[in-house]
Amino acid sequence: MSSIPAVTDFHSAKMNDRRGSLPQGFVLSMSPTKLLSPLAQERVWERYVIALASGVLAILLRGLLEPVLGHAGFYVTIYLAVVFSALVCGLGPSILSAVVGTAGIVYWFVDPRNSFGIMDRRDIHGLVACALVCPALIALGEANRRKQLRLNEARDKLEQRVGERTAQLSQAMANLESEMGVRKQAERELRRLSVHLMVAQDEERRRIARDLHDTAGQTLAAIKMSLANLRQAEPSVPQIERLIDDLNALTDEALQEIRTTSYLLHPPLLDEVGFTSATRWFVEGFTKRSGIQVNCDMPERADRLPEGIELALFRVLQESLTNIHRHSGATAASIKFAQNGAGIELKVSDNGRGLSKEQLARIRESDRGSGVGIAGMRERLRGLGGQLTVESNGTGVTVTVTLSDGKSLTVGSESGGVAA
């Protein structure tokens, strides 16, 4: 008796295991929904075995209920077996279950018992009722079974499509993550290349400045000496005197321009005495060239900084003052530099126009909204582990830089020029 439910549960468990919802092996406790789930049409022998077992089980169950039912209700258990077989196994197996179960009931429980002899009229009525009820139950069960099979097929197809779409989505996500990794790597390489180019640019500026000072500067100095000798060698002739004076003035002007250009490319004071002295010299020349009054507040003595930090500070200062002159419309500016245990602070301010909210938003979002000046500052300081932010109060701009080593650099230019 116990083998029939075990077989039924085993087949239901096997079907669900293929769908990934139940573990492999026998399942002895199933919900009614799982127990009545129809078997696939291809599983022919399994459906007939289960239907036959259901008919046998109906006969055995009727024997257990004999003390209660007595000479009545012969076919109650048959109806249960037929319904189960119709829902789970299909048309043919349910007919087999009905025939086997009815034959067993008639043989063992209907008088005369243990034979298929002639029954009385009341028992014949019960048999006829069974013959009418069973086909109806089989028809209803088969219809429900076919509907459930269609639903299961649709569900399986839907699960398959969901699985395929999930796999495609997973593949797309993997491709996206791979592409993002490649892009991040490209950005890192681009930043390294940008820093390398800036270093190479600084080295090239230093070389050009040295060449201008050592070659063109010396050549012009030699010309001045030759002009002095010519003045002494020639007699005093007014025309020659004027020509020599003009040549001497032009030579002085060219020599001054070469020296200025050389110092702007790379001031030798930055290597010799440090950032503060180079800043004072640059501010003095900037005031003469631009006409903008600059108040420079810097300590008389300051500790030397690493070469990379000094060069970055000087380029930021140089770019800020240059952009103030070009774009801000300022008439005055001030510079304040402080160095202490907490870090370094450099502030450049002016009375220029400042930035609009739209310009400030573009600059804060990315380097694409800013000009070459801001982008160059950011790249230089990013190479030192620093971060640059820009603020504006409507009348000026403040650029703040924080270095990763804990040294704070605040570069404020209250003008529209720094954002150039």
Image: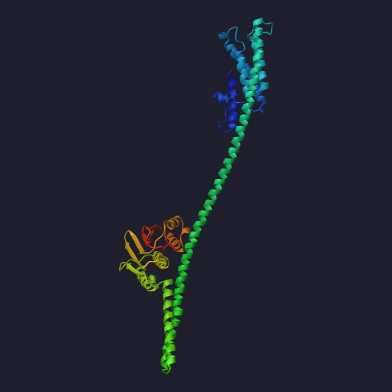
Residue located at (46% from left, 71% from top): 205
Describe residue 178's horizontal placement relative to residue 387 as left or right: right
Q: Position of residue 110 (x, y in %)?
A: 64, 8
- Which residue is nearer to you in this view: 347 or 21? 347
Location of residue 79 with respect to 403 vertically, above or below: above
Look at 41% across and 82% down and name the residue there.
Answer: 252
The coloring applied to the image is rainbow
The furthest residue to the top: 120
Residue 31: name its quadrant: top right
Q: Is residue 44 visible?
A: yes
Q: Is residue 387 above or below residue 88?
A: below
- Of residues 282 and 343, the one nearer the viewer is 282
Query: From what the image shows, is residue 117 above or below residue 31?
Result: above
- In the displayed structure, would residue 171 be above or below residue 105? below
Where, by quadrant of the figure, is residue 132 drawn?
top right
Q: Position of residue 299 (x, y in %)?
A: 30, 67
Q: Quadrant of residue 257?
A: bottom left
Q: Quadrant of the N terminus?
A: top right
Q: Nearer the viewer, residue 171 or 292?
A: 292
Q: Count up the numbered dots.
A: 0
Q: Quadrant of the C terminus?
A: bottom left
Horizontal and vertical percent for residue 73?
Answer: 60, 10
Q: Residue furthest left?
A: 300
Residue lying furthest bottom: 235
Residue 253 lies, in percent from the top left, at 42, 80
Is residue 50 visible to us here? no
